[in-house]
Structures are given as C-alpha cells and as structure tokens.
Image (cartoon, rainbow, N blue to C red):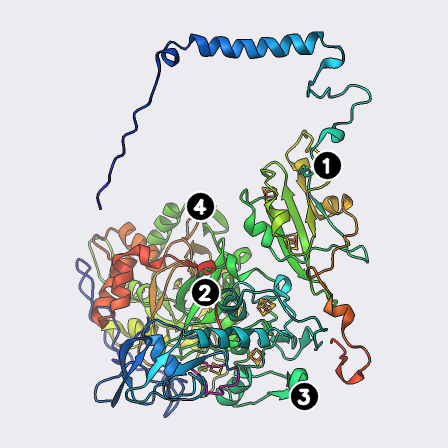
Amino acid sequence: MSNHDSRSTSSTIPPTPGTLPPPSVAPAPRVGMDPRPHAPEGWAPPVAPNRPAEPTEGQETVTLTIDGKEVTVAKGTNVLEASGLLGEEVCHFCYHQGLSIAASCRQCLVEIEKMGKLQPSCQVPVAEGMVVHTSSPTVLKARREMLEFTLKNHPIDCPICDKAGECTLQRHYMAHDHQLTRVDVPKIRKPKHKDIGREIVLDAERCILCSRCVRFCEEIPGTAELTMSWRGDHEQIDIADGHRLDNAYSINTVDICPVGALTAKDFRFAIRAWELHATPTTCNGCATGCAVELHTKHEQAYRVVPRFDPAVNGHWMCDEGRYTYKELDPQARVHRAEVDGATVPLADAIATVATRLTKARKLAVVFSSSATNEANDALRELAEVLATSVKGREGITATRYVLGHPRGEGDAILRDADKNPNTNGAHDAAAGSAGDVDKHEAELALELAGRAYDAVLFLDDSGELSEVALAGLANITSVCLASRRTPLSSACSIVLPAASWAEILGTYTNRQGLLRVVQPAWRPEHDRKHRADLLRDLMLAMGLRNVATAKERTRLLADEHEHAELQALVTDPKAMRPTLLRWANMRG
Amino acid sequence: MTISVKKVSLQRTTRDQIFLPAILEGLLTTARHFFKNTFTPGHGDVETIRYGEPGVDVKDYYPERFRGVHRLMHREDGSVRCVACMCCSTVCPARCIYIEAEDRRDDAEKAPRSFVIDELKCVVCGFCVEACPCDAIRMDTREHWIPTETRAEAVLGKVELMSRGEQSVAVQGGLGASYREQAPKADPRFTHDPR
Ligand code: SF4
Ligand code: SF4
Ligand code: SF4
Ligand code: SF4
Ligand code: FES
C-alpha cells in the first residue's frame, strides 16, 4: 500500500549495463537558488493522533476477546478498530479514522460484558480482559433500529443521488435492515441542491448528521465553515451566514460524507460510481505526491480521489490535485508522430530525430519535473551518449535544463508551491553523474528567444515559455515528447507521441525523497509510448545496443529503494489491473 | 480436488431403437391436424395469424405482456420522466442503452441529456423496464420493431422514444404517499428557498 521508504535519496539510477561510459564534463556552477521542493519546517503527514490498532514494538498492549476471538492491540485503541483487526467491521457512520471521535450516530453499538447498556464501540477504549459481542441478537436489533431512525427522514433519492453505488447508508441498509418503511407521516423537508461553495453542492435532506464534514473543516484545514443548525428532526448541516465552503481541501468532505449529502460540482451527474474502474496511483498536482485513485471508464478519466497513505497524505488531498485528470482530456491527446507538421510513422520520426540530433552543433536537452524518473534517466543517458565521440561523429555536450509547471500556491497542510510531481527526480537525473543542472527555466526562455541553439529536446509538453521563446523553436530542430497539445508541443517542429501518466508504470521522487508510483489505468493507444521507451528507440536508432527499457529502469529503482510494492508491480503486470468500483462497495 | 464421474446408462427398449413407431406416431399427429384444419368449417382451432389480410390487426393477437418498442414516459409538465439513474443501461444484457446525464436546474435535478437505444442490439428481454425505479421506460407500445433500410434508423433517440410516451400516473419515487406533496406547508420556518 504505502511507501514507507524514508531514505532521502540520491535517486539517480545507476548507469544501465551496455551503455557508453559517462563522459567527463566539468560540473557547471548552479545558478540561482535551490529549486528543489522541501516540506515546511516541522511538517508531518496530516494523520489523526491516531487510533493505533496493531501494536508496534515497545507499545503497551491490551488483550481482549471479541466474538470469542482473542486479540492483542495497542493500548488506547478503540473497540471498533480492534474488531476491524479481526476482519469484523462494525457498521458505523460517524467514526472516521482520520478525524476526532464524535460518537453521534450510535450505529456502532456493541455489547460489552459487565457494562449495563450497549456501548458505542468507536468511543470505548479497549481494556484488559474485555469481552465484546459485535453480533449478538441485542446488537443486531439495535443496529437495525438505529438504521430505521436514520432512514426516517431520508429522502431515498438514490436514482438521482451521486453517492448511489458507493453509499454507506445503502450498504448498511442492504446488510442490516432490509425492511419496508413503517413511517406513514410526511418526511421533513430540507433544502436540496444548495450551492454552498466553489466545489460543493449540499442536499440537506440526505444528510444523516454524522458531523464528519464539520469535524473535517475544523480539524484539517482549520477553517470551520460548516455547522449544524436547528434542532431535533429539523437539524441540518449549514454554512454560517455570509460564509461559503471555500477552503482548498473542501472536496474531501464529499469523500468522507457517508451519504450523498455533499456532492462535488465537478463530478455531479458525470457518471455513476459503479461504472468506474479505480487505479491506485500518485497525484501529479504538486511535489507532495499524495496517494490517489484515478477513476476511469473507457480510457476517459472522471475523477481523482485520495487513497490512505500514512507516510504522505493521510486520508486527504487538495482540491487542485483533483483536477489534474483534466490533463488527460482525450480531445487534446497526441496520438501520432509529427515531423514539420506532417503525420509520419513513429519509426520514421525517430530516425529523423536521430539524424538531426547527431548533426546538431549547439544542443539543449530539457529534463522535465513532471515526467517520471525513468524518462528523466533515459534523457540523462541520451545526453551522455551524444556527448561521446564515436567513429564518424564528434561528441556534443548538451546544455541541460529542467522545465516544469510554473510555481503556484502552497500551504503547511499538503499543497506544495512546486506544482510538479518530480522536481527532485528531474534534478537528480539532470545533475546525473555529469555535475549539476546547467541552467534554469528563465534562462532557457531567454536563450531560445535569442536562438542560442540549433536543436532542443523537450522531455515533456508542460512548462510555460514566453511567446518569443516558442517562436524561436519553429526554425530549429525542436523535439517534444508530448502526450497532449500544449503551446509548447505545438511550437515544436517534431512531436513524438508519449504516453500520459495514466498509461504508464513509473515513479516520481516527492519532496520527502520518497518514491511515488504511478500506475496505468489503460494501455496507451495508437503510437503512444512511455517516454523512456521513446528515448530508447532513439538511442537504438543511433546505433546503440542494450539500452534499458522503461520497465527495466523501474525495476532497478524498485530494487534500489527496496520498494516491495513496486517490485511486485514490475514482476506481475496483472497486479496493475484496475478494480471495478462495482465490487468496491462503498467509499466514505 | 477429485473429479468424480457419474455414469448414467440409457434405458432404451427395442421399440425405441428401431425408431419407426415414433416416426409414425409423429406423422399421425401431423396428418390429424392437417385433415382437421383443412376440412373443418371455420378452420378449427388454427392459431395462424394472417398478416396483411384486411381486418386482421396483429395487435389483437399479442399477449397482454408483449414487449414492444421502448418508449419514454412523461412528467406532468411533459418533460422526460427519466432521471438518468443508469439502472437500465447497467442491467441491459445487450449493452444497447446509452445515456448521458445533465442537470435539469429545477427540483427534479437530474435528467438525460441524451438517451439512445439501439433497437438492433436489443434482445427484448425487458430488464430495462424491470430495473427502472421511476416508471420512465416502458415496452408496452405493442409495436413490433419494423425492419429499416439503414442501421441508423433503428437507433432511437430521446425525442423519438418520448414521442411514443405519455404521462405516467405512477408516483415519482415509488409507491405510497409522496412525502413531497404531503410536506408541511404551514410552518414557514421550514420551507426553504431551494437555491
Ligand atoms: S445517500 Fe445513499 S441512500 Fe440516500 S439517496 Fe443517496 S444513495 Fe440513496
Ligand atoms: S453532510 Fe455528510 S458528512 Fe456532513 S454531517 Fe451530513 S452526512 Fe455527515
Ligand atoms: S429489452 Fe433488454 S436488451 Fe433491450 S434495451 Fe431493455 S434491457 Fe436492453
Ligand atoms: S432506469 Fe429508468 S430512470 Fe433510470 S435511466 Fe433508465 S429509464 Fe431513466
Ligand atoms: S460510529 Fe460510533 S457512534 Fe457513530
């Protein structure tokens, strides 16, 4: 699941066997300030002061009996988490691992011997020798009756409710209640489709008043926009007068809402949850590299949702990162190679690039902080190959740049100001064995505008260059490994079709130096290929042999970082198959 | 795991093995029907429907629950009743229903922007009708799908499907009292402006 590798890295991949020896280039002085992202001072992943369940070494433990089975857990664990360890999920609404405990829904009632009444298991800490029954007749009856209360005013809007298919209430109803309504009085009406924020629509009727969203806004972004208003049957979630739910993490409330009371405007009515396939991957939005799931259907992405990772993002992710899937827009994809505006077969384009690059006299290679470690490493290798003189060709030392998305807004929770997922990896590769990164973005733009080069190779299509700089690309050999049409890729004279981050297995090095894994949600169609494989083709076309494939580079990285999950993915491609959400039951 | 094989021996009598008696029995049945239907006045109990003959309406002969061409039902205001819940397109074994949802921007919230059924792919199972929670799709038109000259003509869109439809009298949201109609209107504190 998560990547616990906490070594700070020198994540350059060792030179692959069979390539030319690295040339000796004097290290150039680093220009400007340190471009690498760093987590803020004292930053820790936003994980709740947690309910430890499995005891770690040296922790005090407690042994108790749950449904006749003995279990040993860390002291301070609550009964709900402890029975989760035994694989017996106690049905609950208001408890969330990443938030404080409210114990307001009473759905998690269990029987504990020597305690008079049924107890909310989410709130009761384990005690030595405790005997718990989670499915005695009394508990089952209580569970069913609590559900009946919850459903009393529920509108049962499932046909138009975005949560249907992944709704906790639906699931619990099917598993524990499953009876017709006995309510014959009118239901209480509350506001429906109420616009409460930039990203969020509220349906107060569907709300089961678990207060998860209220606690989230208080505890994670600390903005506390949501509150409960009215009392009793009329109690509802609301925003304070004159305020809106506009914090940078607001869509997390949609994820944790056990019902469809809070829905995201972006995903609203787009598709039904059960039609989606989920691929565990890493967010491309910034240097934090949150663990996420990409939800797709038929080679089209519909949303990005966070995946639990205690080492990086806990249960959360920011709103900005959720929109990274828009980059995968099928309309903007590059499918085939283009040379001087004409579509050509990939092999021809590669041959053209090989000829033109070897003829170049002043060459620049642009590493990309939004491309994977594998791709950046392949570019490092290519630069080294070009720098080596072989028979019939003088070696040419390329100037190395790192380009990426421009900086944005950051905060001390998750968002980093560096809006690239792999700045660390790109700088490591660009520095490589040959010294330091030569130049930085601003200078690249200046020099392109001044026609300083007759050949430039861009590893990725992202990055903002001035119009003058882009105009400077038109008349020189400018190659872009592009997965989509951007001003940059459109300005280049040669475009090689590269697979996007939703189509490849690859790694990023995040700001903590952790290796983050992206996995393919679908296979690259048409001529699209992993950037490292495109560069490999290029090196093969230049007469090299035994160049590592993208997969071999990933394997090397996995071994170097002893990343078991990644090793498994490389060995067994079946492990990368996306899961159909229909079988995933519920989220939130 | 072991696989056990169960052997069943067929009990065939000599009569079964020579086949002839069975064949003759069959012929006799055919002959009996032939004579009865040809020579009895009024064609006996013949069930053959004479398509195309004047005065013969095929629909009169269809069983009550005959599944014909789909139609989409209307709301009271004539708009489409379907709420694009995708239950029908999910259950459809032929995968021939294609729906895109949109926001209606009124209290019903959700409606199909496009609703397409490919009648050529449809296997006329009726699952879509069974699955619909809103009585929005029906197959009670008693209309046979008529062969078309092009495939495109057999792909029905929302407008065509609605042109066969009519207002449904079912309560939206299912059987029983509609809480929407019965909601207390008297207490102004609890009636909210929806937007
Ligand atoms: S919240 Fe769940 S039970 Fe309620 S309408 Fe939505 S899907 Fe149905
Ligand atoms: S809106 Fe959702 S998360 Fe918030 S209290 Fe209601 S049910 Fe819970
Ligand atoms: S009748 Fe069966 S095959 Fe035809 S549209 Fe309905 S569900 Fe699909
Ligand atoms: S099941 Fe009924 S309401 Fe749902 S999409 Fe199909 S026709 Fe529309
Ligand atoms: S989960 Fe325990 S009371 Fe809600």
Crowd rating for badge 4 (residues with CA inside 10 Å; few <14, some 14–19, many 20+):
some
For mark 4, what is the residue? A344
- Which tag is nearer the camera, tag 1 or tag 4? 1
The chain holding disc 1 is B
Q: Which mark is residue B31?
A: none
Instruction: Specify whether residue A448 is in view.
Output: yes
- The secondary structure type at the circle numbered 4 is strand
- The secondary structure type at the circle numbered 3 is loop
Crowd rating for badge 2 (residues with CA inside 10 Å; few <14, some 14–19, many 20+):
many
Hey, what amino acid is under mark 3?
Trp
Q: Is residue A512 magenta?
A: no
- Rounded to the nearest angstrom, the CA distance separating label 4 from label 3 is 67 Å
Q: Which mark is residue B142?
A: 1
Assess whether mark 1 and mark 2 are in contact (beta carbons under 8 angstroms).
Answer: no
The chain holding disc 3 is A
Hey, what amino acid is under mark 4?
Val
**Which residues are the magenta region?**
A94-105
Marks 1 & 4 on one chain: no
